[in-house]
Amino acid sequence: MRIILLGPPGAGKGTQAAGIVNKYNMPHISTGDIFRKNIKEETELGKKAKEYMDKGLLVPDELTVGLVTSRISEPDCANGFMLDGFPRNVSQAKHLDVFLKETNIKLDNVINIEVDKNILVERAVGRRICKSCGATYHVEFNPPKTEGVCNVCGGELYQRQDDTEETVSKRIQVYLDETKPLADYYANEGIISNINGQQSIDKVFEDIVNALGSEK
Ligand code: ADP
Ligand code: AMP
């Protein structure tokens, strides 16, 4: 199964991704995670990406598209993959379409997690992530059993540098201007599933599984 997770920052894409890869056993390709790994390792790509990420802007397409197409070309993606946070604008979607056509790959579903703008800031600002395994928590809506400690692996939790109120607001604006049009783009291709993201984490997951049906 080849799927895309679409939705505004803070919609719950990363949270749901964990459940989806676990159930369907497919690689989780998050461009945000790839950029953050590069920043941590102080690579050239990381240095360039950081300039944009710190401002809540999109990293330019020329740094992003090739990264994803080469990742999809790796052997572990042969039977399926899940893209999280890519594509982020119509240009990226068109590049992806060209690549998929050339390689004879068909997208099965675009899961579009919908959440009202006014609750996104609260979600993103309260987000905490495990330094070791990447599990996602929220200080209020999905707290770990012990404050600051990951339930899964005992790792230390941290707050993303771009999860400040100011940067999140900018990221939401960028989403509305550049990413939201992708919902129409994929609706035209007839492969979108709109999911209400303002329900419990478990109920959102149930709706996603129902949308994916028996696809393999
Ligand atoms: P995204 O990857 O779309 O930016 P995340 O999955 O990181 O979003 O979720 C953003 C924040 O909202 C996290 O702190 C997460 O724990 C919390 N969250 C995710 N889904 C829900 C939900 N259904 N209800 C309440 N909070 C949620
Ligand atoms: P995310 O982890 O998906 O919230 O992304 C964090 C940041 O990484 C975004 O605000 C962008 O600066 C950058 N980013 C992630 N994915 C993309 C993409 N597909 N295109 C451009 N920038 C991206």
Image (tube, rainbow, N blue to C red):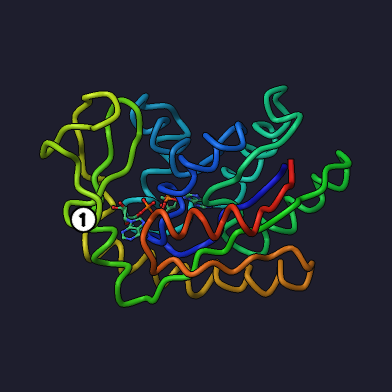
Question: In this image, 36 relative to 147: left or right?
Answer: right
Please tell me which residue lies in front, 45 or 169. Answer: 169
**Residue 21 vertical position relative to residue 211 in the rendered view, above or below:** above
Q: Residue at x 62, y 57 (%)?
A: 210
Residue 57: x %, y % from top left: 42, 59
Q: Residue at x 31, y 77 (%)?
A: 118
Question: In this image, 213 relative to 37: left or right?
Answer: right
The kind of secondary structure element at disc 1 is: loop
- Quadrant in the picture for the N terminus: top right
Where on the picture, by quarter, is residue 199? bottom left
Please tell me which residue lies in front, 2 or 71. Answer: 2
- Quadrant in the picture for the C terminus: top right
Question: In this image, 145 relative to 33: left or right?
Answer: left
Residue 209: x %, y % from top left: 59, 52
Please tell me which residue lies in front, 174 or 81. Answer: 81
Q: Residue at x 87, y 48 (%)?
A: 101
Mark 1 CB near ligand 1 (8 Å cut): yes
Where on the picture, by quarter, is residue 178? bottom right
Residue 25: x %, y % from top left: 60, 31
**Residue under pointer 1:** 126
Q: Residue at x 67, y 75 (%)?
A: 184
Residue type marked 1: Gly
